[in-house]
Image (spheres, rainbow, N blue to C red):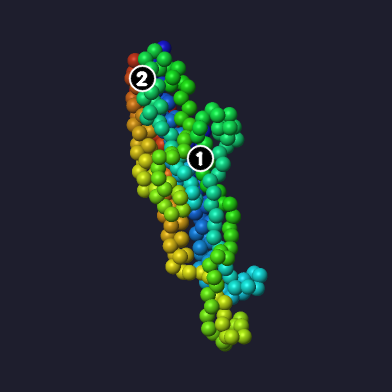
Amino acid sequence: MSLFGGLEISASGLTAERLRMDVSAENLANAQTTRGTDGQPYRRKEVILQETPGSFGASLSAAMGANKGTQGGGVQVAGVVQDTATPLKRVYDPGHPDADAQGYVSMPNVDTVTEMVDLISAQRAYEANVTAMQAAKQMFSRTLELLR
Amino acid sequence: MLFDTTQLALERAIEGAGKRHEALAANLANANTPGYQRVDVDLHTALAAAVGRGEDTRSALGSLSFAPTRDNSAGATRADGSTVDVDAESAKLAANALEQQAAVQVAHARIGILKAAMGTGV
């Protein structure tokens, strides 16, 4: 079913963008967390998105050389990884319980501006997927009108 | 024959628009996937080629597959190598939905004419 496929693809986009939003919110919430689950300062998390491989039938026909194209199957989350590339922030605060011998505290590598930009980009992408879903719905109900 | 090649072409156009919608929706779903290459269905070229076949039009229309293809002509618009431009995809999606609705309306009108001819009313 062509149009239901379109709805599913848009739904995968909604799920992915919602997760990005959740992860950005988590990063913002933990912007000052010096004790993460492993006892170390919190490190910002990032969502890795990847294209969903097409359906079995589409992959088979592509492998058989029936068509050069590959069926776009929406998006999926490959994983949520910690950002270890960006260094932790060092803040001088000798009174802090987690300060080291020199009086410096390692703060999370969360940059609120980056997170806000990620949030907005996730929100806009979410809206684009909702629009695609509405268009699919409209197309489908119009086609149903053929029966009337 | 009750349904002529025009009606068949309209049906195939509606189906093709559905497939194209799927491809464009996949592009939007992958708006934030690094290195993603956009896909598209070349609906118009395929339909035009089939309709211009004269006697073979019916079989040519029947064998249209509307397979999505990678659009390698689009250059990367972003630093992450993705070729998806959300605005352009949204515009294509809206245009595609309108084309589909136009085809549906023409098909509907033609069915109405048949119904009138059969005396069952529109």
Q: Chain of mark 1?
A: A
On the image, the x and y values in percent for residue A82 come to: 58, 63
Residue type at the position of mark 2: Gly
On the image, the x and y values in percent for residue A10 come to: 48, 45
For the residue carrying disc 1, how many other residues have a C-alpha within 10 Å: few (<14), some (14-19), or many (20+)? many
Depth order, front residue of A42/A130? A42
The answer to the question of whether label 1 and label 2 lie on touching residues, with beta carbons closer than 8 A, is no
For the residue carrying disc 2, how many other residues have a C-alpha within 10 Å: few (<14), some (14-19), or many (20+)? few
Residue B62 sits above or below residue A71 on the image: above
Left or right: residue A109 versus residue B112 is: right
Residue located beneath label 1 in the image: A72
Quick one: quadrant of the C terminus of chain B? top left
Q: Residue at x 48, y 46 (%)?
A: B36
On the image, the x and y values in percent for residue A139 come to: 41, 36
User: Which of the 4 image quarters holds residue B112?
Assistant: top left
Quick one: quadrant of the N terminus of chain B? top left
Q: SS of the residue at dot 2?
A: loop
Whether callout 1 and callout 2 share a subunit is answered no
Residue type at the position of mark 1: Gly
Q: SS of the residue at dot 1?
A: loop
Q: Residue at x 62, y 85 (%)?
A: A101
Q: Chain of mark 2?
A: B
On the image, the x and y values in percent for residue B99 come to: 35, 34
Residue A8 sits above or below residue A85 on the image: above
Residue located beneath label 2 in the image: B52
- How far apart are labels 1 and 2 at the CA level? 29 Å
